[in-house]
Image: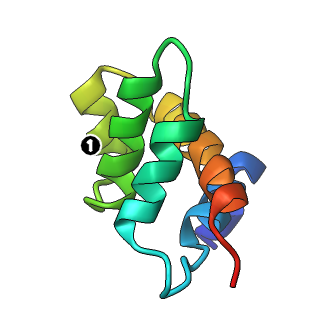
Amino acid sequence: MFVQSWTIVELTICMVISMRIPNYVCKSDIMNVLQEWVIGQNALRNKEIYSRKVFDGLTFETVAEEYDLTDRQVKNIVYSISKIVNSHIPKQ
């Protein structure tokens, strides 16, 4: 089976990304979370990577090629930012 060949990290990333964002949360809310909570040396690049994957729907491989990174690096970035976003999405 295809899923059996995935690593635990890859499955976790897929679970985090596939979490449904509630209907009352708009893209601008997520962008505000990114602006406020994603900080550090590569913050701008990482926000762009997250946006390309989540909002534009590109594959990990495509994003990795755009930014000259490995698939694993892109997955780690998206996973880390997804955790931040999910922890700061307002609850109703």
Q: How many marks?
A: 1
Which color scheme is applied? rainbow
12 relative to 26 in the view: left or right: right
46 relative to 61 in the view: left or right: right
Question: Residue 59 appears at what percent x and percent y?
Answer: 33, 53
Question: Residue 9 appears at what percent x and percent y?
Answer: 72, 47
Residue 32 position (above or below residue 29): above
Residue at the spot of label 1: 62
17 relative to 54 in the view: left or right: right
- In this view of the protein, can residue 7 be seen by the observer? yes
Q: Amino acid at mark 1?
A: Thr
Asked which quadrant contains residue 66, the reply is: top left
* Residue at (55, 25) in percent of width and height: 39
Question: Residue 1 appears at what percent x and percent y?
Answer: 64, 73
In front: 92, or 21?
92
In front: 82, or 34?
34
Q: Secondary structure at mark 1?
A: helix
